[in-house]
Amino acid sequence: EVQLVESGGALVQPGESLRLSCAASGFTFSIYWMAWVRQAPGKGLEWVATIKPDGTEEYYLGSVRGRVSISRDNVKTSLYLQLNSLRAEDTARYYCVRVAHEWVLDNWGQGTLVAVSS
Amino acid sequence: DIVMTQSPFHLPVTPGEPASISCRSTQSLLHRNGYNYLDWYLQRPGQSPQLVIYLGSNRASGVPDRFSGSGSGTDFTLKISRVEAEDVGVYYCKQAFESPWTFGQGTKVEIK
């Protein structure tokens, strides 16, 4: 069974940093693209970032590029999202998502909540 | 960026009756490989999103056959032939034709 378990969400002040983690199990992590998708409270879904299986390619939402970094450790079967210079508009639940063929988001974690407030 | 627009925003449904959600994109999602890069996701209340339909018309594993997806290019439809109580939640369409991947604003399906 595919499992994606996020952690690292917290209440932080504007300008601070946070590192989200996602522990993956139940599938061969190293052959899948992975992504982060976020959802602000009461709002819709927003794709944030995607990373290639070997970690050599990354893609970002324009509004987070330069402040956010996606990475992975295929030995630890873990996905990460480094969030820097956090803003109030980054407040959201962040989902770790497995990317299947043709960019289909076929498995989602339960999410971890990031709240940015002074 | 490709903008995805769903309608209706809110859909009250009667159990056993059909339901239909529309999704339109500002540019064609039909790739030269023949795939429409359009998926549908359901987020049940208090849960994470789950895949329902991928590449326009393919049911995800475990999705009942009362769900169907159709359309091509810029116009897509998700249909539920006979709504059941477990189908309530917010449905999102998503395009992956080009980056950034974008979602529709969501359609909330509720039982009347």
Image: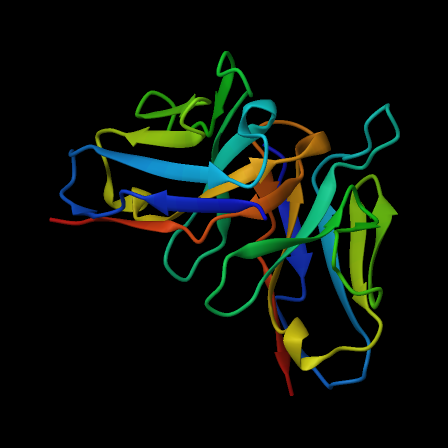
Q: Quadrant for residue B37, please give it.
A: top right
* Residue A63 visible at all: no
- Residue at 80% across, 48% down: B75
Which is nearer the eye, B108 or B74? Answer: B108
Identify the residue at the far right of this view: B34
Residue at the extreme top: A56
Compared with B2, A68 (above or below) is above
Is B79 in front, or is A80? Answer: A80
Residue B35 place in picture, x, y as percent: 83, 33
Residue B85 lies left or right of residue B57; in this view the side is left
Residue B30: percent from the left, percent from the top?
82, 33
Q: Residue at x 86, y 24 (%)?
A: B33
Residue B73 position within the rendered picture, expressed as x and y whole percent measured from the top left: 83, 39
Above or below, comparing residue B10 to residue B14 in the picture = above
Residue B14 coordinates in the image, percent (x, y): 73, 86
Residue at x 49%, y 54% (from the top left corner):
A44
Question: Measuring 81% from the left and 82% from the top, which residue is drawn there?
Answer: B17
Question: In the image, A31: left or right of B45?
Answer: right
- Along the line of sight, the residue nearer the viewer: B77 or A104: A104
